[in-house]
Image: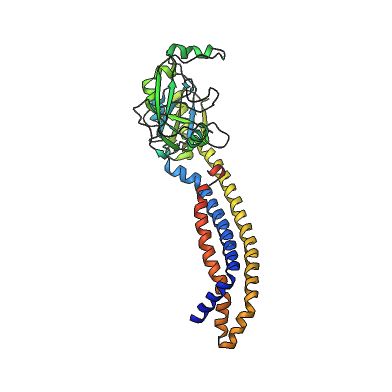
Amino acid sequence: MATVLCWFRLDLRRRWRALLVLVLLIAFAAGTVMTAVAGARRGATAGDRLLAQTLPATVVVQPNQPGFDWDAVRVLPEVAALATFVLTDEYGIDELPPDAGVTRYPLGGNEAMRTIERPVVLEGRLPDPLRADEVVIGPTFRDRYGLDVGDTLTLRLYAPETLDGLVFADGAVVEPDGPVVEARIVGLVRSPGQLLSGDEGPGTAGGLLTSPGLVAQYEANLLGASGQGIVNAVVRLDGGEAALADFKAGLERVSGRSDIALWNLAEEARHVRDVTDFEADALLAFAMAAGVAAAFLVGQAVVRFAAATAADVDLLSAVGMTPRQNAWAGTAGPLAAGVVGAALGTAGSVLASRWFPIGTAA
């Protein structure tokens, strides 16, 4: 072995440039393949990992009826959790342009973001449900408007009587004339509800989630003096989507209505999973193609390196080296390049992992 190491040191001094090129080729090839495979794995599991942590809603219930009795729905045996939201964005935010299109339906009740649609907190924390002046945002909102955790948003609400009149305003611009809430962004979050409702993702305006305390303290400013504002809800069912038929029957029984719109979020989640699976398969196909191409590219480089050293290695037999030692001497350079290149490729794939997953999975 000492003889082989002596030859390798001599060969390294003479042909370090060729070995360096071989190392870089192997590192680039290995890094590309490993990054694509790891990215595909992350992408394929992204939706399931998010759902596993967030107590996702099963269905959005949309009676669109003022004064709807949600307490009767809460006690249905299929209901594991229920959170209401006011179907209005009739309040101003000074820091956003008037045409921002940001989704900002106020959440109601203490269950929101706690027992249902509990977001993953990327930075900061969830809002205190008892405070009206705390909100959380999604990454798209942050990137689009340059507002982050710790920044303040000025929420301008309408007077209850003014809010009642907005439905008759025929598109006229009516300035908010009610309370002003200086709300602080306390968290950067992600949840399935944000994604499925289109709040987050390429081409969207982003969204923010207000604390349930806003509705609790300013109910009349969000529902109007007449209380005719619309309150809908998201519901998580025991048994998931399988319990949807029984829940629908119970909903019809307690509401006396058979026309209530139900948005099946479990079905939407399956669609998202299909999309992420397709993206992952595309990445795996790329990894396979890159691997095949790399095998030919690196293989040719190794063959050329070995051919160039073959004549020198044959001369070693004249000084007493065995065929086994000759084989080790001839392959020592490519073997070392492979080890170093694979290590560099692994490190590169770890660094590149910050950009994955991509597409819908991101």
Q: How is the image coloured?
A: rainbow
Q: Kindly indicate the quadrant of the structure image that contains residue 99.
A: top right
Q: Position of residue 325 (x, y in %)?
A: 54, 82
Q: Is residue 1 visible?
A: no
Pick the front one: 213 or 14: 14
283 up-or-down from 15: above or below: above
| Residue with the most extreme left position | 130
Q: Kindly indicate the quadrant of the structure image that contains residue 273.
A: top right
Q: Position of residue 189 (x, y in %)?
A: 44, 37
| Residue with the most extreme front position | 13
Pick the front one: 21 or 104: 21
Name the residue at 48% across, 80% down.
2
Q: Position of residue 73 (x, y in %)?
A: 41, 28
271 up-or-down from 110: above or below: below
Name the residue at 55% across, 71% down.
335
Pick the front one: 267 or 245: 267
Q: Kindly indicate the quadrant of the structure image that contains residue 127.
A: top left
Q: Is residue 276 visible?
A: yes
Q: How many marks?
A: 0
Q: Position of residue 111 (x, y in %)?
A: 38, 32
Pick the front one: 311 or 123: 311
